[in-house]
Image: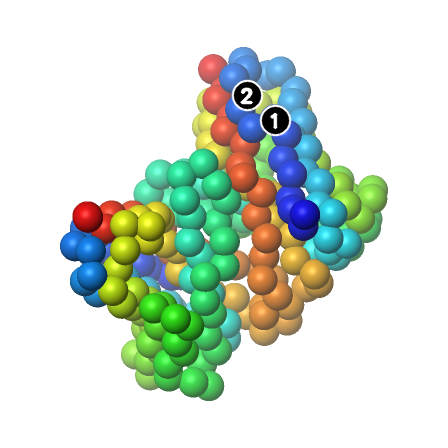
């Protein structure tokens, strides 16, 4: 089954403790991205990657890092999480870069930073 | 600066009625306008999309109407069903780029 898999689905942690949210897709997609969803704000893009070793900032990149060492994986790293990063995070992928490429989303990771 | 404005924030429609969600954009470089549907506990999923060279696109009970001069587009759900209860996001992107600019979402409840 074609899918985008995120782990963990839920995480409660404390300020300053480094964490990584993994994202993996099995569709051989070139393009991957991370969004955060906050009430009343919709989805906002954090980072995206057009291919292996090619990443760029989205609208809200502060406090986050990403890497794309393999085509299927695109982890999101919070090196020193803060409470304002409490949010619902989604990873998405599409076949390639392009506005007409439908994006496939994972089921989300709910992070709570205390 | 919010580039895609979506309204209403929430909507209650009776079964069989028409649900209408509106979006307006500011960036004239946008040339692809998808709608995503999100159920609780799930990620958004592409529902229907339109390019500005057409004024309307219909897929089953879902129709997008597009007004290029007004920079507005809307989603119409005909014969709304309880299973349509979800959050709907309009979005926009620019040719050649995958980055989506989302509206803030509309929570639709279709009452039985």
Q: Is residue B73 above or below residue A112?
A: below
Q: Is residue A61 above or below residue B5?
A: above
Q: Which residue is mark 2?
A: A11
Looking at the image, do the residues carrying marks 2 and 1 touch, with CB atoms under 8 Å apart? yes
- Helix, strand or loop for disc 2: strand
Residue drawn at x 61%, y 26% is A8
- Helix, strand or loop for disc 1: loop
Residue drawn at x 25%, y 64% is B79
Q: Give coordinates of residue A101: x percent, y percent.
A: 61, 65
Q: Give coordinates of residue A15: x percent, y percent.
A: 54, 16
Q: Which residue is mark 1?
A: A8
Residue A57, can we see it?
Answer: no
Residue B63 falls left or right of residue B17: right
Residue A13: quarter of image: top right
Residue drawn at x 40%, y 60% is B90
Q: Is residue A3 above or below residue A18?
A: below
10 Å crowding of disc 2: few (<14), some (14-19), many (20+): some
């Amino acid at each position: 089954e074609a899918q985008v898999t995120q782990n963990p689905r839920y995480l409660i942690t404390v300020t300053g403790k480094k964490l990584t949210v993994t994202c993996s897709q099995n569709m051989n997609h070139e393009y991957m991205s991370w969004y955060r969803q906050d009430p009343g704000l919709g989805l906002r893009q954090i980072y995206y990657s057009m291919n292996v070793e090619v990443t760029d900032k989205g609208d809200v990149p502060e406090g986050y890092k990403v890497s794309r060492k393999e085509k299927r994986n695109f982890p999101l790293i919070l090196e020193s999480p803060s409470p304002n990063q409490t949010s619902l995070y989604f990873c998405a992928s599409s076949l390639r870069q392009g506005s007409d490429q439908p994006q496939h989303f994972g089921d989300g990771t709910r992070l709570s930073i205390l | 600066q919010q580039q895609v404005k979506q309204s209403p924030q929430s909507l209650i429609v009776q079964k069989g009625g028409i649900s209408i969600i509106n979006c307006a954009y500011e960036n004239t470089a946008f040339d692809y306008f998808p709608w995503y549907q999100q159920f609780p506990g799930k990620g958004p999923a592409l529902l229907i999309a339109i390019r500005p060279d057409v004024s309307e696109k219909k897929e089953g009970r879902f129709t997008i109407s597009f007004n290029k001069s007004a920079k507005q587009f809307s989603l119409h759900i005909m014969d709304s069903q309880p299973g349509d209860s979800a959050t709907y996001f309009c979005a926009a992107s620019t040719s050649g780029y995958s980055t989506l600019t989302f509206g803030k979402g509309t929570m639709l409840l279709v009452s039985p």
